Image (cartoon, rainbow, N blue to C red):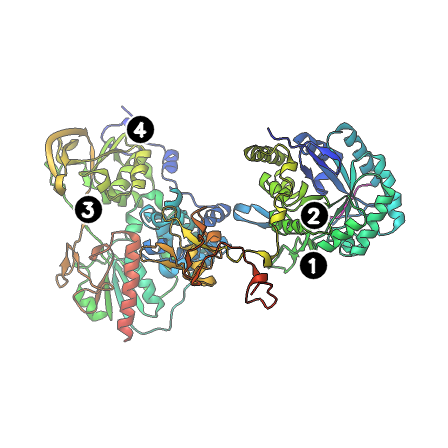
Amino acid sequence: MAQGSMAPGIQSGRLSAEDLDENFADLHPPYAPHEAAVAADRCYFCYDAPCITACPTAIDIPLFIRQIQTDQPESAAKTIFDQNILGGMCARVCPTETLCEEACVREAAEGKPVEIGRLQRYATDTLMAQGVHPYSRAASTGKRVAVVGAGPAGLACAHRLAMHGHDVVIFEARANAGGLNEYGIAAYKTVNGFAEAEVDWLLKIGGITIETGKALGHDLSLETLKSGYDAVFLSIGLGGVNALRAEGEGRAGVTDAVDFIATLRQADDLTTLPVGRNVVVIGGGMTAVDAGVQSKLLGAENVTIAYRRGRDAMSASRFEQDLAASKGVKLMFNVQPVAVHGNGAAVEVELEYTTSEGGALTGTGETVRLRADQVFKAIGQTLQGAPEALSLEAGKIAVTGAGRTNVAGIWAGGDCASGGDDLTVTAVAEGRDAAQDIHASLMS
Amino acid sequence: MADLTTDFLGISSPNPFWLASAPPTDKEYNVRRAFEAGWGGVVWKTLGAEGPPVVNVNGPRYGAIYGADRRLLGLNNIELITDRPLETNLEEIARVKADYPDRAMIVSIMVPCEEQAWKDILPRVEQTNADGIELNFGCPHGMSERGMGAAVGQVPEYIEMVTRWCKQYYARPVIVKLTPNITDVRYPARAAHNGGADAVSLINTISSITSVNLDDFSPEPSIDGKGSHGGYCGPAVKPIAMNMVAEIARDPETAGLPISGIGGVTTWRDAAEFMSLGCGNVQVCTAAMTYGFRVVEEMSAGLSRWMDEKGYANVSDFVGRAVPNVTDWQYLNLNYVTKARIDQDACIKCGRCYAACEDTSHQAISMSDTRVFEVIDADCVACNLCVDVCPVEDCITMERLTAGTLDPRTGKIVSDEYANWTMHPNNPMSTAAE
């Protein structure tokens, strides 16, 4: 029987533990101090720097890089954390190529921006490795705030509230805090249990309690939270996954990409994690790339990401596309799934070519079949379990200003709330800003 | 192909690049390899008087100033003159010179300010058949505390006296090496000239403390928690050295006195600049100490190419060409009116020009919502700071206003007539015709 990548069906143990260790190592190895100094020296300390404008959390990037230049990575970290308490994770997962580094004037000048993300990681890692938490709490206000969801938005909100002297309880449906930092995101972007360590570090400020296994709509209701707390912040993420709406979607082997990624992230031993020989990922975002690349890294023989529009429309950045290609993942554009064929379990995916003339996507009628014993759906997540009292906007909780919902005393932020890109860094910004608004409301 | 052969005081060398008196020229092994690498000449590390040699510290001798990526910009040292026996050095000098007759061999000397001391050592140096001597009146550390080095170079009368002794007791060329640790370098240069020196060489190192250890508060380099000022050299000192060279080159009292240029020469361009300011050759130390002897290959090739491009057949074709253009401030043309011009296509929108102009003085650059930076002619004094801070070469340039146009800052029509401060109405000493 064929072994390794050639083994038929969905199998674990395609690669040795050594190969898996190598495949899932840090995508961008951390800087050594001299590398950081050289990289930092490239920063021009621009006036009203475009990188700051491009950062959703508005980190003072030229200042923190200058602090690295002057051999104070700890001061640099403080500059970062002042704006973004999850600056460590954002340094790893931010699509910097479409944010700060795209705006860097050296990108315009020579196509090689200052490596802001890696410098940010150097600074934040240095401080966090010292086990130091650089913030303390203001005197207790006696106010209590409930935060629902321990993802980036919830954690950022809770930290800022705790800093202002409020007592915070975070309710988290899953077993671990961290949200997509813990359950989403490719493993090679956050190695060595960083997400969990970051949560532990963040909680060092004190005043924050996390209650896991508590989900809104099951164990909690908005009414009880409203009556039990002085304010409520909802950061419940997007729990649902869009359907393929293709024939045969129910066949075995067709699963949600987010579940595959979550299982992978929680796995203690990747040799036990099954993956198909022929994997097809449907979608064009970061989740599609994370699922596709990690399938390949687990030892799948053929991995294809099938996206219904052209390359330029793909929400995964060009860097992510190139990363996938470099790992041997095939990218197909302008194809949409019409059927999953098989006999009980999936065997093939049938894709129809598309055109998008005048913005409307239409099938051309021409189809192609790809072998597929595993099909991942990565065509977007949807809001699930939002309380009925809340108004929605485009399928998300409608918010105005700093995350205010239509219900007084209820704020929302992160992926579940309207507006903003669904990025870790935007979630942090929304959580932080909502906390400031909650604080102002509570203290007025 | 340009001919780099240099005649300095009648001493011929295949190129104008000499190694300065310093650690790289302290022994035969080094100097032979330097000549093999292509150096045109060396000034042997300074010899002291007969007797027990000096001793050096046994801890760090050097301190450094870095630019980006630990690029060495400035080096400071507390090393003394050669700590090897005089006879050993003299034997080696004679052997190397015999084997490399086409290279310049100069011997640096530092003995006490007593006639007998010079009378004793000079004949022995002469016997080596070296091409000339250089009087070390420059080292600012250690030896100066014993009345030698910079302690002599800071007293013009001593310079003249010792130079005179050397010309009396030594038949070959005498070069006087000057210290920059003075207020006006023309006085020691004039003294050397008056004493009969064949040439001056400059600069020696600048008294300096490169850094302070903020844990134990010791200056660096630290010797058991204490530090002593050292001599500063390397690329950082080049501007200071070039000014001193130019001051001597254009001083009527020393006009025509040959100069050997020293101070941060690192590339062919540095050498060309020093020579254009009147140096017949240059001496190099820090670049060789930092990168090794091979840097002379770049210097020779680079100077040769530049000379070819400019049509100079010999180094003498461009030596001193910049000297007539070094003048006093009072003679600068006040009717030379320029304005900064920003090339919008080259601009990368960093805004450094804006920050510099805004926070320095003139507020003469505007910034739009879309980060377009433009010069406000009515406020631009043409200071050049924006050019200096711009990270993109040639993105900002200074453009001269043509005669007859209005300078919106002064409200005056630009004149094409030369007019300087001595003629200006605001000058109470003005000599302008009413």
Residue on which disc 3 sits: A380
Dot label at residue A4: 4
| Mark-to-mark CA distance, 3 and 2 | 73 Å
Instruction: Name the residue rendered at 75%, 56% in the picture.
Output: B154
Q: Nearer the viewer, mark 4 or mark 1?
A: 1
Q: Chain of mark 1?
A: B
Callout 3 environment at 10 Å: few (<14), some (14 to 19), or many (20+)? some
In contact (CB < 8 Å): disc 3 and disc 1:
no
Where on the picture, by quarter, is residue B4?
Answer: top right
Residue type beneath disc 2: Leu
Judge whether residue B383 can be spotted in this image: yes
The quarter in which the N terminus of chain B is drawn is top right
Query: What type of secondary structure mainly makes up the magenta span?
Result: loop
Asked whether B80 falls inside the magenta stretch, the response is yes
Residue on which disc 2 sits: B202
**Do marks 3 and 4 share a subunit?**
yes
Where on the picture, by quarter, is residue B277?
Answer: top right
Residue on which disc 1 sits: B183
| Mark-to-mark CA distance, 3 and 4 | 31 Å
- Point out the stretch of residues depicted in magenta: B76-85
Residue type beneath disc 4: Gly
